[in-house]
Image (tube, rainbow, N blue to C red):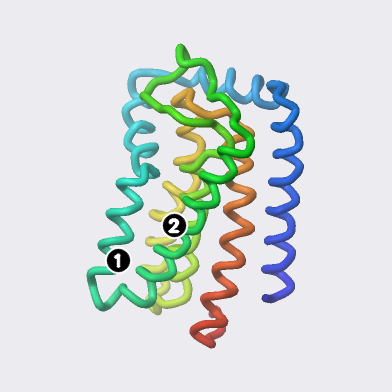
């Protein structure tokens, strides 16, 4: 693992540990309250349906369909399908364990704009989107030789990468620390998966 990857991985892991320690106290943090109130103030009839579509992009059904599509076609199976699918399975399993450990209740149901059950920490949508779309961006930057096409794909993939997590707060089903914790841990896992991918293929990232 390169020095840069190691620093990013350790930073993400440290961020997750710090957030997890605060969450473990069982108290709602001032950070959560301030950010939630600000995001709720943005709710309107135009933005809500857009963010619903974005949040559904992080559902397990959507991620599973994406992985299947990447695995079906020979052109994408080995370069994209397998690495992305391994990442999705890994973070899904890990997040289920974390949720059971912390058992953090979700925000009050009166705040929900969509139906959502289960525990709150960490946000499965956030950790999964960080790994899945982050890995896709890495692979696109690595394998797509046409720089204009690579840049366009990077921008398109960055939208769900960033906004799926934010949409979970907007929808009222997660606290900001759920999303931030998911991003931090997802980033650490992403660096490990990228290291494994580079080691397995024995190629340098361009």
Residue 73, horizontal then vertical, whole percent: 23, 72
* Quadrant of the rendered image containing residue 2: bottom right
Residue 137 disc label: none
Residue 11, horizontal then vertical, whole percent: 73, 55
**Quarter of the image that includes the C terminus:** bottom right
Residue 38 versus residue 182 in the image, above or below? above
What is the C-alpha distance between the residues marked 1 and 2?
Answer: 13 Å
Of residue 12 and residue 4, the one placed in the foreground of this image is: 12
Identify the residue at image location x=52%, y=31%: 119
Q: How many labels does the image show?
A: 2
* Element type where label 1 sits in the image: helix
**Quarter of the image that includes the N terminus:** bottom right
Density class for disc 2 (Cα within 10 Å; few <14, some 14-19, many ≥20) is many
- Residue, disc 2: 88
Density class for disc 1 (Cα within 10 Å; few <14, some 14-19, many ≥20) is many
Of residue 61 and residue 11, the one placed in the foreground of this image is: 61
- Residue 114 is left or right of residue 36, and the answer is left
- Residue 187 is left or right of residue 46, and the answer is right
- Residue 43 is left or right of residue 198, and the answer is left
* Quadrant of the rendered image containing residue 29: top right
* Element type where label 2 sits in the image: helix
Q: In front: mark 1 or mark 2? A: 2
Residue 33 versus residue 143 in the image, above or below? above
Q: Earlier in the sequence, mark 1 or mark 2?
A: 1
Residue 70 disc label: 1
Identify the residue at image location x=46%, y=16%: 109
């Amino acid at each position: 693992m390169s020095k840069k990857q190691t620093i990013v991985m350790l930073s993400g892991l440290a961020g997750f540990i710090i957030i997890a320690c605060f969450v473990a106290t069982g108290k709602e943090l001032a950070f959560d309250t301030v950010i939630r109130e600000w995001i709720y103030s943005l709710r309107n009839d135009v933005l809500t349906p857009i963010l619903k579509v974005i949040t559904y992009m992080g559902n397990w059904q959507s991620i599973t369909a994406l992985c299947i599509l990447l695995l079906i076609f020979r052109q994408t199976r080995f370069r994209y399908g397998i690495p992305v699918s391994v990442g999705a399975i890994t973070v899904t399993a890990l997040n289920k364990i974390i949720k059971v450990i912390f058992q953090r209740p979700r925000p009050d149901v009166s705040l929900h704009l969509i139906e959502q059950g289960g525990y709150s920490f960490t946000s499965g949508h956030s950790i999964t989107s960080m790994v899945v779309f982050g890995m896709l961006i890495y692979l696109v930057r690595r394998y797509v030789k046409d720089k204009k096409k690579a840049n366009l794909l990077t921008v398109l993939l960055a939208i769900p990468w960033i906004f799926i997590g934010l949409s979970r707060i907007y929808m009222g089903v997660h606290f900001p620390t759920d999303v931030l914790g998911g991003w931090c841990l997802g980033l650490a896992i992403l660096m490990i998966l990228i290291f494994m991918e580079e080691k397995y293929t024995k190629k340098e990232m361009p």
